[in-house]
Image (cartoon, helix red, strand yellow):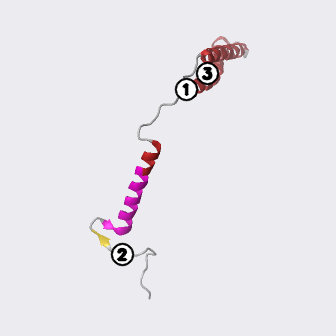
Amino acid sequence: MPAIDPGQDPIGNSSPTGDVRLSSLDARLKAATEAEKARTGVAPRKPDKGYRQGSRVLTELIAGPAGGALLGWVMDLLFGTAPWLLLVMLVLGTIVAFRNIYRISQQRPE
């Protein structure tokens, strides 16, 4: 009957810290990490003003109509006015969103 082989490579020469392959991998990972830090810079950058303005526009475009629709739906449930308050509040939310987007667009990016 053959000996049970786990299918793994033998460890080889052991170093005081453990497996030679693991210490070699650790050294390569440290070198790669240092090279990446040198390439990209250590300090994380803040997004520029144009990117922040774009995010605000997207937020307004989604939140305005969604908030108006949610508020109109709740008011419809309270007052029993079927879809009318939902539609009115959806339109008002869209108008407010576009007004806010216009205001954002009037600000100059640096």
Q: Position of residue 39 (x, y in %)?
A: 46, 46
Q: Quadrant of the N terminus?
A: bottom left
The alpha-carbon separation of the residues under discs 1 and 3 comes to 12 Å
Secondary structure at numbered mark 3: helix
* Earlier sequence position, callout 1 versus callout 3: 1
Residue 52 disc label: 1
Q: Earlier in the sequence, mark 2 or mark 3?
A: 2
Q: Is residue 64 magenta?
A: no
Report whether 106 appears left or right of 34.
right
Nearer-N-terminus badge (2/1) = 2
Prevalent SS, magenta region: helix
The front one of 35 and 101 is 35
* Quarter occupied by residue 109: top right
* Pointer 2 residue: 12
Which residue position holds label 3?
60
User: Is residue 11 shown above or below 97?
Assistant: below
Indicate the secondary structure of the residue bearing disc 1: helix
Packing grade of label 1 (10 A; few <14, some 14-19, many >=20) is few
Chain part drawn in magenta? 18-34
Identify the residue at image location x=57%, y=28%. 51
Q: In the image, what residue type sits under mark 1?
A: Arg
* Circles 2 and 3 in contact, beta carbons < 8 Å: no
Task: Name which quarter of the figure residue 96 lies in.
Answer: top right
Between the C-alphas of marks 2 and 1, the distance is: 54 Å
Q: What residue do we see at 55% from left, 26% from top?
A: 52
- Residue at the spot x=58%, y=16% of the render? 107
